[in-house]
Amino acid sequence: MRAGRAGGGTRPALRGLLALLAASALLALAIQSFPGAGPCDGPRGWPRPARRPPPALLEELSRRQRDLLRLATSGGAPRGGGLGCEDLSRLSGVGVVGSGFTKLVLRAALPGAGAIALKSVHRAGRDVSRCVQRYGHPAGCRRLAGYKLLKEVTLLQRLDHPGVVKLHGQCYDNSLDPEIRVIAMLELGSPLEMIQLLQTPWEERFKICLSLVKLLFYLAHSPLGSIVLLDFQPRQFVMVDGNLKVTDMDDASTEELSCKKDNDCTLDFPAKSFVLKCTAAGKCEGLNEKKNLFNAYRYFFMYLLPHTAPSALRPFLSDILNATGDLRYGINETLGAFEKVLDLYKSGLYLQKRLPLLKEYISLKGFRTMEMQDYKCWPSYSHLGCLLSVHNAEEAAAICNSQPQCQSFIVTQQRTWTGRPLALFRSSLTDLIPDVNAVVYMKRSAASRERL
Ligand SMILES: Nc1ncnc2c1ncn2[C@@H]1O[C@H](COP(=O)(O)OP(=O)(O)OP(=O)(O)O)[C@@H](O)[C@H]1O
Ligand SMILES: *[C@@H]1O[C@H](CO)[C@@H](O)[C@H](O)[C@H]1NC(C)=O
Ligand SMILES: *[C@@H]1O[C@H](CO)[C@@H](O)[C@H](O)[C@H]1NC(C)=O
């Protein structure tokens, strides 16, 4: 099979990349651990006779190929991304960013395009080595894994959403029969660090959950039908500019399970199982969508949503957790519920009625405080001091009142993703500098002490 922009004439460019790749320790290891698995010829330079893969492997290969063809012809207009094999020779600064069972991911700089990610088959990964153990045919096994990556590329070419990693291009080479070499060029992200996320402000964690919900909504109504991520875990996602994106799509499926009765539509999870409806058309209704949603609940919402949420929003969040955890909501209702929480948060309606506290502060118009080291608070947006997202000066006054060190604050021009300003809380009243656009709020009690 020959597809995409690539052709046999691009092999010198590919060799260029392979030479670059070989510089990375991991890839060198990958090649070494498979004697005779070097590019084209054996590592010592003699050509290796191609041996036909055993029948069972051929069977798997043709199943994967059919699966791929069905996907490639199932609608949705493919977008290639502008890059192809010829761009590989322009890459520099190649380094490893990650690897999984099937794929190896490198980063590289491309003049004009910045840093990109390159995905290829992980020749020493578990997927290939298991297959080799079973079938004893390394090249055929690499082809099998190559189909997985091709499937991912085929999906990425047809999906267009901010929550799906962007495909910049691809390079295929099938002149190494039976192997096909595939390199996918993608938007570069950074791995999702759950532990680190737990230490970020609630607003940022809510953003991640909301982007995930928007992604699942898109997948449920995608041009290819309802897509399920069969292997749904935080490590299938990366962060790009603070946005969550799915990067691992080789284990996605667009097929809904066929059934005769409801019991055929059982969704099994380690601690729970659900029985869905079997429709008259003989398909499990909404199974793909619900599987994604429950996984979102158990891997993301449960950890990221409730922790340090504004107290007035907690009942709404508990409802989302309960409804997704019991699969009472579909993705449409879940998105609706998330958007409602976002509106409440943005409008400040979540703020409980408080005494007006701002009148306990003197406002100094035309001044701001200098950016310098001061006391810390959690979860600050700055490591230098206490910088928090607020609805307005009134909420900032309430926060300042609750912190013994706080003597003054300013509401800065910086905004969070929801459009809320960041307020900087300070323990001193000195270090004022003129700024026509700013106002410093100072505790009256502190200001009078200062005058003494
Ligand atoms: N676009 C990207 N930018 C940065 N890092 C990435 C990107 N895509 C993937 N990675 C990293 O590489 C790892 C492996 O990628 P990927 O999940 O696609 O491979 P895999 O072999 O299918 O993995 P798994 O064994 O989890 O199924 C990811 O866990 C992630 O940390
Ligand atoms: C949802 O709430 C009901 C009623 O309080 C409770 O029985 C159920 O266990 C909850 N489910 C989840 C997933 O929290
Ligand atoms: C969910 O929303 C989509 C897109 O707006 C719509 O096509 C679909 O019918 C809705 N599904 C349900 C169950 O409401």
Image: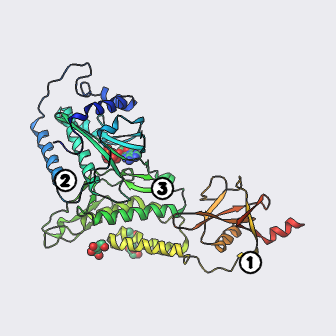
Q: Which residue is mark 3?
A: 242
Q: Looking at the image, which residue is at 46% across and 71% down?
A: 317
Q: Which mark is residue 102?
A: none
The reply to whether residue 271 is in sight is yes
Residue type at mark 2: give it. Ala
Quadrant showing the C terminus = bottom right
Residue 401 in the image, given as x and y percentages of width and height: 71, 70
Q: Which mark is residue 72?
A: 2
**In the image, which is nearer the foreground, mark 2 or mark 1?**
2
Q: Answer yes or no: do the residues labelled 2 and 1 have beta carbons within 8 Å?
A: no
Residue 7 in the image, given as x and y percentages of width and height: 21, 38
Sequence-wise first label, 2 or 1: 2
Colouring rule applied to residues? rainbow
Q: Residues within 10 Å of mark 2 (few under 14, many from 20)?
A: many
Q: Which mark is residue 359?
A: 1
Vertical comparison of 377 with 34: above or below: below
